[in-house]
Image (cartoon, rainbow, N blue to C red):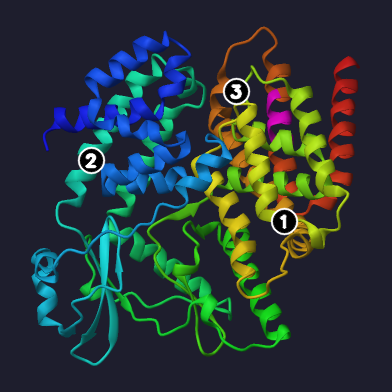
Amino acid sequence: MGFLQRFWQLVGYLYFCAYEHLAGYVPGFVVKLIGFSLFFPYRFLLNYPPPVRLRIAFEKLGPAYLKVGQLLSTRIDILPAEYIMELEKLQDRVPPEPLEEILKSCQYLKEHIVEFEHTPIGSGSIAQVHRARLKDGREVAVKILRPNVEKIIKQDMKILRASVRILSRFISFFREFRIPQIVEELEKVLLEELDLSTEAAYMELFRKFSEKEPSLYIPEVIWELSRRNVLVTGFIKGKKLNEVGELSPEEREKLAKDFVRIVNRTVFELGVFHGDLHPGNIFLLEDGRFALVDFGIVGRLSPDTLSAFFAFSIGVMNKDPDLMVGALKRIGAITEGINIPLLKREILVFLDKYYNKPLSQIDAEKLFYEELSAARRFKIVLPEELVILMKTIAHTESIARLLLEDFRLPPILKPYLLKLAPGMVAKEVKRKTVNLLMAYGELLEAIPEIVTRPTKDKASIEKRELFWGGALIGSAVVLSFAPKLLLVYLPLIFIADRLAKGRKKI
């Protein structure tokens, strides 16, 4: 399909998905006339409710848009809950390519593999996975990109960007929620998923982390056989979480808590987390360890974003709207046009719904969804990685319920966060102090220029600038390595400054 034909097809689907919105800007008969004359083949969408229309459009547009729809299902800060629930029905199951066709791009594998199962164990929009056996007897899983998938995705994303820019001129929703920027973020995630060497690197990172976490197992990457379009890993023989069989309530509770601990540790200690945690990507091994697969979507939090999310979570647990709003400001989610007092009031009203319940009765997944719905009402748009993280944590509870039916996340999460708080605060203070030291390193470099600069009161200004430059550097060092000494250091600086002024007067 050519560029113009594909562009017309996409605009046609988007037109009828946004039919009601368009009718709010131009007369209804004009919207109907344009739709039924220019985009006649897609009028069938009007037979469905708007959320269903959007899901059907993504399914009809093909693999690239199927993936876009799945990624959009994480953006409840933009789309209403009914749209999110509909998009979550999108299944990344695409008819597989014939094995011979798939292997054309990786003929070298035939030299190392003696047995290759023709039927894939997984077939998605971007890649498919086959079980195989190496010459040395090892069972492996081979993930191979579909032919021409990169070219198709790049073309489709180019068309989507152009379409969204056009619609942004006519529909305020697209501008208010930064839809063009969101599309760019989605494109970045999709293109990263096309590079299987990146997925391999993340698997290696999680595998090293699993050495410190006894309940986690990550399959080994066979590096000598992996390429940008091919990922070969050890094959996992485990059970799905809904197939664990007869277990005692105590065993189920332990497994649920182990899983929650794994997710929390990857987020708050590793700073990297699995961005596509659903039951199909989680296996339970015979020895009780959890095995994770499919690291195509991985979230990595910057120190600032992680710190803000931690503060936001503590704010939720402690019913502190100031802490929550402050965290949102730090990541740039709150713009000047937002009514801060009203936002804080809405947060308190929202939290009151939950704080009259015991922690054991709070549904964490529902709580996070309602939080993000409130953010959407105030036109707060969160960073992509933060939305994925919040949904991951919320889904952690629903996944744990496959093991323990009445499991609730808050009773475990709150004490974990409070226990982690001192270390997180100390780490943040140390990080910012190091940044401060680096900044004042520039002051040290400028000292020769300061000393030789001609001034009206050269001697006095030289001493004052040198004194306070050294004092600031010293306070940064003390704060990093011996914070308690600040109680002694700061008064001494003040006394030294007063004595210096006294000598000047004499």
In this view of the protein, which residue sits in the foreground, 118 or 109? Answer: 118
Which label number is shown at residue 499?
none
Q: Residue shown at 23%/20% (left/top)?
A: 38
Q: Residues within 10 Å of mark 2 (few under 14, many from 20)?
A: some
Looking at numbered disc 1 in the image, what kind of residue is underneath it?
Answer: Asp
In which quadrant of the rendered view does residue 82 lie? top right
Instruction: Judge whether 396 appears above or below 119 on screen.
Output: above
Residue 18: x and y, percent?
41, 26
In this view of the protein, which residue sits in the foreground, 322 or 436? Answer: 322
Picture quarter with the N terminus: top left
In which quadrant of the rendered view does residue 156 lie? top left
Cα distance between the residues tagged 2 and 1: 40 Å
Examine the structure image and report whether residue 120 is included in the region drawn in magenta: no
Cα distance between the residues tagged 3 and 2: 57 Å
Q: Residue shown at 46%/20% (left/top)?
A: 21
Q: Residues within 10 Å of mark 1 (few under 14, many from 20)?
A: some
Sequence order check, earlier mark of 1 and 3: 1
Which region of the structure is painted magenta? 465-471
Picture quarter with the C terminus: top right
Label 3 sits on a secondary structure element that is: helix
Looking at the rendered image, the disc whose residue lies closer to the viewer, 2 or 1, is 1
Looking at numbered disc 2 in the image, what kind of residue is underneath it?
Answer: Lys
Q: Which residue is mark 3?
A: 451
Q: Is residue 69 visible?
A: yes
Residue 244: x and y, percent?
55, 83
Q: Residues within 10 Å of mark 3 (few under 14, many from 20)?
A: some
Sequence order check, earlier mark of 3 and 2: 2
Which label number is shown at residue 154?
2
Label 2 sits on a secondary structure element that is: helix
Residue 173: x and y, percent?
49, 22
Looking at the rendered image, the disc whose residue lies closer to the viewer, 1 or 3, is 1
